[in-house]
């Protein structure tokens, strides 16, 4: 297994539950080497089903924040357009911090940290060769690439690379919102707040412990920032405030108080990314089907990890046949979600902001 994101860890944890050892090779030198990112909503039939297969659903439910499903939509002048709150017993899409999810999945797993894979070479007599950044090399029967958007494993099966969507996201965060920014806390509530303007969106999401992640999204050429240093937080802040000029003050305050800024141009793989089957190598999650971040990627990644692991552990022992059947199922389902999320991004960061509201009304239960 290459990668210890949601796909890799779920795969490894389900195999572990069935008594099969699995080696997880992770490039990061330690679990907390990078900030883990924002909150994830895990859907009942997807991420939660995967956790059930891993025997971790009850532990997830104890950590998850069902109230985090709440969603408020504002006009750019601050008018509240929608204010949706889940019922107290609503468990359809509860939120969980990525760090909590990772620790839950890690449990007893043996992850080899600091083992960046540079190349995966199928077709040798002894199996699939894996080359590492430190120059070492090992051979495996099956290499499952769950190494994310810029997967090195993918090169062993496909020449396709991600392309830019035309939408960039710049992320910032605020700590202790309830005490340090008490005036902004009611704006965000228990879950998320979003405002949509012409080709712009600003979304803030509550994580646990009063931490809030803010995403400023806008249509722009990939080189929109060439005039500034992205490491200069004040320059990025000024640039974002200019981009969102005229929006209501409390929404802009989310940018004014943001600590640091992370630049994330949104890349995707083609909607139907498939490849001629290669003996001994397959892909899961973003490595197989990177799509816009609209609540499906981690869910699919986990479900795929759980399903492949379960089929391998409980199947008739035909490793290659099991992987082939899994790929067919994964491709069909991922293509459906890639279409949905691609169309969703078009509407959420759109020349016509009413398209975003219409999308919300379409998908949100009343
Ligand atoms: C802002 C944002 C919000 C999102 N919100 C949601 C949400 O609410 N719900 C949802 O379902 N999805 C969401 N997503 C999408 C989700 O984060 C991804 O789809 C998901 O993380 C994919 O999981 P993965 O395991 O395939 O890949 P990743 O999470 O990218 O994990 C890949 C792992 O592989 C490791 N790795 C990479 N290269 C190598 C290498 N060469 N050798 C060894 N290891 C390597 C990486 O260090 C990493 O640990 C969001 C995405 C973004 C950007």
Image (spheres, grey):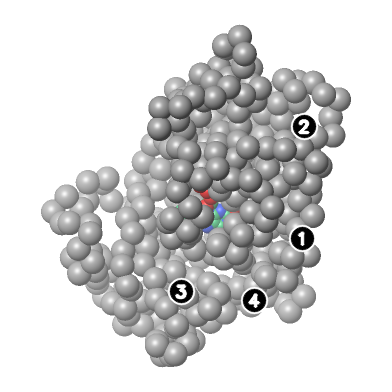
Say which residue label 2 marks: 312
**Total labels drawn:** 4
Q: Residue 57 carries which label?
A: 1
Q: Where is residue 23 in the image (x, y as percent from the top left)?
A: 63, 37
- Label 1 SS: helix
**Which quadrant does the C terminus fall into?**
bottom right
Pointers 4 and 1 in contact (CB under 8 A)? no
Instruction: Identify the image quadrant of residue 337.
Output: top right
Q: How crowded is mark 2: few (under 14 residues within 10 Å), some or many (20 or more)?
A: many
Q: Which residue is drawn at 62% across and 13% down?
A: 126
Q: Does the residue labelled 3 lie within 8 Å of ligand 1?
A: no
Q: Position of residue 230 (x, y in %)?
A: 22, 57
103 vs 137: above or below: below
Q: Residues within 10 Å of mark 3 (few under 14, many from 20)?
A: many
Pointers 1 and 3 in contact (CB under 8 A)? no
Q: Which mark is residue 212?
A: 3
Say which residue label 4 marks: 67
Report the mark closest to the observer, 3 or 4: 3
């Amino acid at each position: 297994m290459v990668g210890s994101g949601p796909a890799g860890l779920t795969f490894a944890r389900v195999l572990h539950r069935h008594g099969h050892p699995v080696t997880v090779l992770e490039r990061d030198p330690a679990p907390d080497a990078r900030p883990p990112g924002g909150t994830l909503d895990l859907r009942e039939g997807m991420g939660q089903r995967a956790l059930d297969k891993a025997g971790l659903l009850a532990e997830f439910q104890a950590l998850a924040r069902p109230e985090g499903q709440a969603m408020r939509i504002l006009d750019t002048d601050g008018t509240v357009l929608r204010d949706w709150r889940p019922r107290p017993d609503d468990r359809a899409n509860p939120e969980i911090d990525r760090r909590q999810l990772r620790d839950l999945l890690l449990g007893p797993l043996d992850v080899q940290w600091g083992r960046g894979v540079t190349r995966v070479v199928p077709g040798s007599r002894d199996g699939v060769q894996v080359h590492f950044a430190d120059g070492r090399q090992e051979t495996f029967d099956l290499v499952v690439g769950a190494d994310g958007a810029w997967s090195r494993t993918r090169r062993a099966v496909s020449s396709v690379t991600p392309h830019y969507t035309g939408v960039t996201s710049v992320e910032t965060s605020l700590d202790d919102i309830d005490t340090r920014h008490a005036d902004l806390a009611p704006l965000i509530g228990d879950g998320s707040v979003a405002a949509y303007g012409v080709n712009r969106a600003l979304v803030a999401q509550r994580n646990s412990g009063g931490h809030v992640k803010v995403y400023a999204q806008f249509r722009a050429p990939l080189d929109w920032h060439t005039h500034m240093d992205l490491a200069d937080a004040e320059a990025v802040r000024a640039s974002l405030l200019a981009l969102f000029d005229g929006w209501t003050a409390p929404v802009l305050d989310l940018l004014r108080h943001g600590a640091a800024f992370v630049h994330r141009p949104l890349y995707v793989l083609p909607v139907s990314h498939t490849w001629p089957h290669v003996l001994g190598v397959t892909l899961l999650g973003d490595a197989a089907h990177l799509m816009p971040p609209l609540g499906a990627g981690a869910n699919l990644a986990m479900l795929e990890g759980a399903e492949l692991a379960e089929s391998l552990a409980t199947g008739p022992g035909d490793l290659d046949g099991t992987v082939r059947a899994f790929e067919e199922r994964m491709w069909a389902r991922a293509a459906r979600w890639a279409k949905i999320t691609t169309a969703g991004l078009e509407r959420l960061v759109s020349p016509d902001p009413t398209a975003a509201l219409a999308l919300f009304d379409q998908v949100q239960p009343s």
